[in-house]
Image (spheres, rainbow, N blue to C red):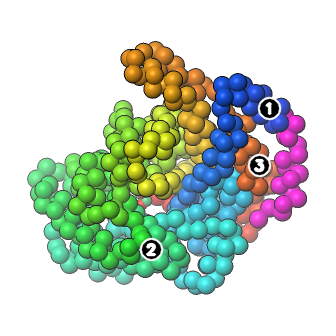
Amino acid sequence: MIPEQRIHDLNEAGLADHEFRLRYLTDLLSRRTLDVQGVIQQLVDFQVAIPSWALGTGGTRFGRYPLGGEPRCLEEKIEDVGLLNQLNGSSNSISLHIPWDIPRDIPALQQLLQEQKLVIDSVNSNTFQDQKDQHYSYKFGSLSHTDQAVRQQAIEHNLECIRHGEALGAKTLTVWLADGSNFPGQQHLRRAYLRTADSLASIYEGMPSDWTMLIEYKPYEPHFYSMVIPDWGTSYSLCQQLGKQAQVLVDLGHHLPNTNIEQIVGRLLQFGRLGGFHFNGSMYGDDDLTTGSIKPYQLFLIFNELVDGARDQAVTNAAVAYMIDASHNTKDPLEDLLQSIQNILTSYAKALLVDREALQEAQENNDVVRAEELLRDAFQTDVRPLVAEAYRHSGGVLDPIAAYRAEGIREKLIQQRGKLSLSTGL
Ligand code: PSV
Ligand code: MN
Ligand code: MN
C-alpha cells in the first residue's frame, strides 16, 4: 500500500493543471445544464472487477515473457488488486478462477480482503483444462460430454466453485464452456445443446437462492467448427430455461468481426437478461487486449446503451457485473489494467454527456445527421479531467500510471517476489 501522504504528494504536482482543465470543462458542460458533479459521482460509483488471471503475464501458445514480480498466490493477487484500487478507487473486487485460486485459509483471506477494502466478485469454473488429479478428461467436452460420468464430474466442479465462493462472500458463478467440435459430424449439435442445458440445470439447482449464474458465449476457439454456446441467443435460451438467477455474460472479444455488440447489449437489457460484462480490446477475436485500445467508439456506443437502459423505467434489468478479462504478453499487466479502467471510465463519462432528450427528438424526426452528431459531440469531448477528479474523490491519484511508475512499483514487486515468479495467465 502507498502511504496516504505520498498519494497527496503525488497529486500536488499536477493539481494546478488539473484544476484549470476541470474548471474549463465544468463551465462548458454547465452551460448545457449538465450536472457535472453528478457525472463525477457516477464515475466514482462505477466499479469494475479485476480477474485474478490478468495480474500475471499471459502469453500465446507460442511463448510467454514473464516480467517478474507477478503474484504467486491468491494473497498476492489480492494485494495487487488492492494496489490498483488504491490508485484509482475503481476496482474494489476480484474474480477468482478455480482451481487456480483455491482459497485455503479463509479467516486470513477475509482479513486481507477487509484490509485491502476488497470483495470477491465472482468465481469462474474451469472445465477447459484437465487437472492433475482429475478422473475423466475434458478433451471431448465437459457439461456437454456424451458420457454422463464426465458431465457429472464437471457439474461437481461447478458446485465446488460455488462452495469456495460462498466461503468468501461471492454471489456469482461464471460459466464459460470450451465445449464444441472441430469437424462436421463430430458432434450432434442439438444433443450437445440438450446435454449442456441438463448439466447447467443441475448446477443451477445447487446454487444458493441469492446467487447468479452468468453464462458466457464465444463463437470459436478452442473449437473451430462449432461451439456449444457460440452466441448470445444460445446463452439467452439457456437462461430462459434455467430461471431468473441465470443471466447472459457479454465478453467483448467473443464476437465475429463487425458484430453490432451495442445492439446485443440493448436487446439483453430489454429482455432483463444482461448479467455481466467482460471488458477487453479486440482486433480479430478473443485478443484480450487493453479495453478501448482498438475500438474506442464501439466502447462508447456500448456505454451509451447501458446509460440509456439505466434511465429507462421500462428496463428492469438487475445490476450488471462488470469485469475486465484481459491478458498481456507485452505490457506490464498492472499498467494495462490501469489503462483499461481509464478507458472504461472515459467511455462511461462520455455516454453520460449525451443529450438524451435531443437524441430522442432527432430519432423521432428521423434526423439522421443530428442524431449522429449528438453522439459524436459527446464522444469527442475530452472528459479526462472528470475521470481524474473521480479518482481523486475516491482517495486515489490523478494519474494512476504516472504514480505507478513514480513509485517504482514493478521494481519493488520484483524485489519482493523475484524475477521468475510463476503466474496463471490465460
Ligand atoms: C476464454 O475465451 C476466456 O478468455 C473466457 O473469456 C473466459 O471468461 C476466460 O477465458 C476465463 O475463463
Ligand atoms: Mn471472458
Ligand atoms: Mn475470452
Residue 265's place in the image compared with 333, above or below, is: above
Asked if residue 133 lies left or right of residue 408, the reply is left
Instruction: Identify residue type, mark 2.
Output: Pro
Q: Around disc 3, counting alpha carbons within 10 Å, would you say few (fewer than 14), some (14 to 19), or many (20 or more)?
A: many
Tell me the magenta residue range.
1-17
Write the residue at 55% across / 28% down: 355
Closer mark to the observer between disc 1 and disc 2: 1
Magenta-highlighted stretch: main secondary structure?
A: helix
Residue receiving disc 1: 23
Nearest the eye: 409 or 324: 324
Can you give x and y, in whole percent of width and height, for residue 77 in the image? Answer: 61, 67
Q: Around disc 2, counting alpha carbons within 10 Å, would you say few (fewer than 14), some (14 to 19), or many (20 or more)?
A: some
Residue receiving disc 2: 99
Residue 24's place in the image compared with 192, above or below, is: above
Residue receiving disc 3: 392
Find numbered disc 3 in the image and state the secondary structure of the residue it sits on.
Answer: helix
